[in-house]
Image: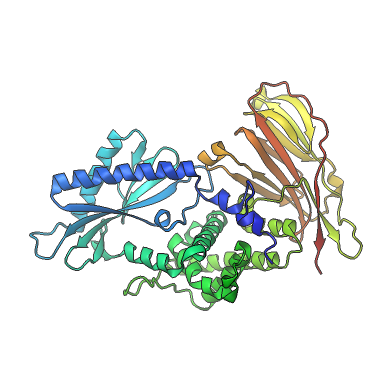
Amino acid sequence: MGRASALFNGVGEQTLISRVSPTARQREFLQTSWNDLAKHLKVSLKAKHGYSITTWLQGSYKYGTLIKPVHPGEDYDVDLGVYFEWGKGEGIEPTADQLRRWVQHELVDYGVQCADVSSVAEPPKERCSRASYQYQFHIDTPVYHLNTNTDKRRLACLTKGWEASDPKAFYKWFRDARTGGEREQLRRLVRYLKAWAALSFDDIPDSRPSSIFLTVLATEAYPDIGLALLLGVPDDDALISIIRTVHGRLNENRRVQNLATEAEEDLNRMSDEAWTAFLPRLDALLDVAERAAEAADEGAAALIWSEAFSFLMPLPNVDEVELVDERTSRALMQLPDIDIAVYTGSGEQRRFVTNHRNQVAGVAKGCTLVFTIANPHIVPQFATVEWTVRNKGLAADASSDLGHRRIGMRLLRAEERTRYLGTHHMDCIIRVNGQVYAARRVPVTIRDVQHHIHAPARPSYTRLSMKRRR
């Protein structure tokens, strides 16, 4: 157990938690942006409409479970609640629609003044307005009435009027569920589950579980880890326990109650059709967790977890991975060699520059790399070949481009463009019936250079041999 714990939240340069969490620089920009918007709304709305205005940061940012966007074009989501305060009997009350129109107008005005705001959504959403910023994030501004006599809150909806909602109560419930190191681990576990959800439902977005849905499930399942919590449980073991509990619970009863409110609120808002499509993905996640729990070593566990976390899951710092039969100590297949052809330009202007094998020690940005298995005869007839790009660095983070994956039956070739300076990886993984037989990690170092590029000396490789359990 705990075979891949160092790759989940260890001290290495690349861990799963570091790859899914915003960087310090990104958090600073988010904090500055929402603070500036909050100040503007509080001053301007009070001056124009006379009500005391408060704001409350809510959602994943507030809970400490915010994750990076995992695909280019996606945004960070920050929720900034705007509260109009008045008590009972204080004159004619504004309607929910009026509050929404007031806040929408102020957002539009602020967007004109703030160079970092790229657009304000028009029309606004049913439950919030949205200001989109440069650098791939947006701020949603749900609007509430805070009754100063009763301390009760209600959400102003665009067409449906008032809706009972108290995000502050949910935050307190989550904050108080665990303390100290357990709370920090729970936050990491929620982020792992959110990363899985962000990657696993591209083709069926209606079945993607919401953040609050996963947060409640993980929080309620956390105590099931048991007495081992007293001694500390590695993140991968804790995640396996959470997945088992959640899988069993949701197959018994799909309802997930919001325990922070007295009202009967089911956080599972999927339709019957979406729920039916969700369950097989949950089954697949459980299968990954069970196989990772039985993995013989770190490399085997990491490759299994990569089925759920794709390019977000870091792999051990090795160049080659082979599967060894425990009885004979022989590799089940020969390791693939990867030839990499480098081209500049595109289309009719594309020009061949040079070839590399198993690594690219220096290549310029904007080149095309063609990766080909040089010994295709070793690939079994019905094997699947995965080509996974794992990017890293500030530029990749800023573009939400941490990688991607292509999978195909005997997919012997893949083509990529070089975009970000630094060393990244193309991982070629060969599986037979889901079992990893061999893998080749191809480091690609992108430099600020002009071509011509000379072929590097043949490197000394590090090999990882994994034993197959029977």
Residue 466 image offset from top left, x and y in percent: 80, 58
Q: Residue at x 44, y 74 (%)?
A: 255
Decide if residue 278 is in sight here.
yes
Instruction: Spot the residue most to the right.
Output: 328
Residue 27 image offset from top left, x and y in percent: 44, 45
Res 57 → quadrant? bottom left
Q: Is residue 34 left or right of residue 218?
A: left
What color scheme is it?
Answer: rainbow
Instruction: Spot the residue most to the bottom.
Output: 252
Q: Is residue 404 left or right of residue 158?
A: right
Q: In this view, does 126 lie to the left or right of 267?
A: left
Instruction: Spot the residue most to the left.
Output: 91
Position of the N terminus, as image quadrant, is bottom right
User: Total label count?
Assistant: 0
Decide if residue 280 is in sight here.
no
Position of the C terminus, as image quadrant, is bottom right
Front in this rendered view, residue 377 or 197 = 197
Residue 381 image offset from top left, x and y in percent: 82, 54
Front in this rendered view, residue 319 or 281 = 319
Front in this rendered view, residue 361 or 180 = 180
Q: Which residue is drawn at 56% across and 50% down?
A: 18
Res 368 → quadrant? top right
Q: Is residue 275 left or right of residue 34?
A: right
Q: Is residue 53 above or below residue 269?
A: above
Residue 450 image offset from top left, x and y in percent: 67, 21
